[in-house]
Structures are given as C-alpha cells and as structure tokens.
Image (cartoon, rainbow, N blue to C red):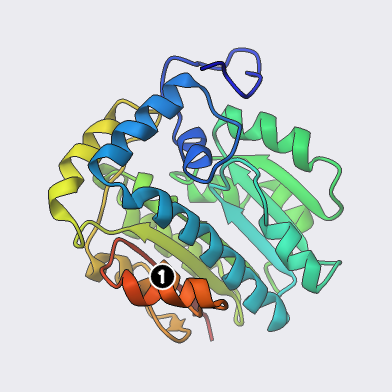
Amino acid sequence: MEDRAEAPRAVDLSTPNVARMYDYYLGGKDNFVADRAAAEKALEIAPQIRLAAQQNRAFMGRAVRHLAELGIRQFLDVGTGLPTQSNVHEVAQGAAPDTRVVYVDNDPVVLTHGRAILGGAEHVHIVQADLRRPEEILDNPEVRERLDFDRPIAIMLVAIVHFLQETDDPESMVARFREALPPGGHLVLSHVCGDALPASVPGVTEVYKHSSMPIVARTPDRIRAFFGDLDLLEPGVVNVAQWRPDSAETRRIAEKYRRPYFLAGVARKN
C-alpha cells in the first residue's frame, strides 16, 4: 500500500508514531506504513481500540460543546494530536466565534501538520511544549499572551496522560494543571483503562513499546484520582460513550460497552 500522507522533512517513517496510529484508528489519512502496521497489530489483540478511539474523540466534542454552552471561552488542549474533524476550536467556536484555543504538543509531526492545517484559523495558536514539564506550558509566553488565567479556562488532557510513564509521576503533573485552573475553570481528561480486558493489556503495551511513546493503562481508581478535589460534572468518570451521549447511536454503544476500557470525565474548580 502506498503512503497516503506526504511526510514532512526529517520525520522518522520507520518508527510507529502514536499520533499517526490514533489518526489511523479514526480513519484519517495522515499516517504511514509503519503506523498502520503497528495499529493493525494492536487491533488484532484488542479490536475495540478503534471504537474506543472514535468514541473518545466524540466525547471530546461533547465536552467542549457543553463547556462552551456554559460560557467557557478559553481552551488549552495539551497533547492535541493530529488535526482531524471536529477539532476543539471548531466545536467551541461553533458556539462562540470569539473563543480562544491554544493547542500544545511536543511531537514535530503534529506541529508540522497542525500549523499547516490550523494556521489560518482565527483565535487559534499552536505551541511546542512537553506535558512532562507542566511549567513549560503554563508559563509559556505564547500561552499567557493568548489565554487569561484569571478567567475561566478549560484544560484538556484527552487521551494523553496514559503516555506518561510511572517514572514521570503523572499524579503530580496532572495536579499542577489542576492548580493552575482559576475558579470556574474545568479539567477535561480521558485515559485508557486496562480493567475491562486485562488479558489484552500486555500485548497492546508491547506494541506501543516499539512506537514513539509507550502506553500505560491504569485502574479506574487511579484515573478518578487525577481529578483530585475538583467537582466532577455528572455522570462522573465513566466509559467515554457514557459521558452525556447525544445520539441514539452513542446511547446504543454506551449501553453495549459498559466495561471501563477508556474512561473520561469533566470537573470544575470552585
């Protein structure tokens, strides 16, 4: 099969890239042979990954739309991944055109594609920084110039914290983002959970060990703990399809797939 995307210069095409693998699960075209091969290996072990990725993306859209309806006009999307349909700024600005969105990623592939695709969008900016260094993001002059941390803001950590290793101390890193929220701010977070199909976790983990970023599935209790003392919005931390489903198809999926494979929640700081 020929590559469907044109590779930016100096991009490693031999190592599967997690952002491009995710793009493949979503049916995107910004992926290459190595990405597709690794993604297919993961799907052989856990076929539900594709549906989970699609439902995670749909959760993000519902969460952003809900927060925009609540009046949130600033979004900081950390670990944004490759641009696809229904990006944060598209959903938020659909409700309020003056909404400001800053995307953050440390992956040069994401940055190259993101700047090319999103560069012309109004009130949208992309910053290169690393989730593992929260202050690098929160104190970034480009971020501070565009977002006012004295006003309500939503920090998005969607499908990214599971790429933090235990040695990174993920609890402390997420806590730093919680602390940075002003009153009325929200944390949006989703995370792979291994409790639903524990037998598949070692195999999928092994596939990702050979990618650009290893993955770590965590328990429901640990995922809930990432929200700290913030007030969880209903229905709490649930499977992604169960977070305020807005269509008959999503409700059907939410009813059918109740086991915690991919958990998500939205919480408010008072």
Where residue 79 appears, x then y in whole percent? 53, 47
* Residue 152 can be seen, yes or no: no
Most distant residue in the left direction: 199
Where residue 202 appears, x then y in whole percent? 16, 41
Where residue 251 appears, x then y in whole percent? 46, 77
- Element at label 1: helix
User: Who is closer to the viewer here, 193 or 106?
Assistant: 193
| Dot 1 amino acid type | Ile
Q: Is residue 264 above or below residue 90?
A: below
Give the residue at x 68% y 32%. Answer: 113
Q: Is residue 152 above or below residue 2?
A: below
Q: Is residue 21 left or right of residue 195?
A: right
**Disc 1 target residue:** 253
* Residue 54 can be seen, yes or no: yes
User: Who is closer to the viewer here, 108 or 136?
Assistant: 108
Q: Residues within 10 Å of mark 1 (few under 14, many from 20)?
A: some
User: Who is closer to the viewer here, 46 or 159?
Assistant: 46
Where residue 269 appears, x then y in whole percent? 52, 81
Give the residue at x 12% y 49%. Answer: 199
Location of the C terminus by quadrant is bottom right
Q: Is residue 257 left or right of residue 109?
A: left
Q: Is residue 38 above or below residue 75?
A: above
Give the residue at x 53% y 50%. Answer: 135
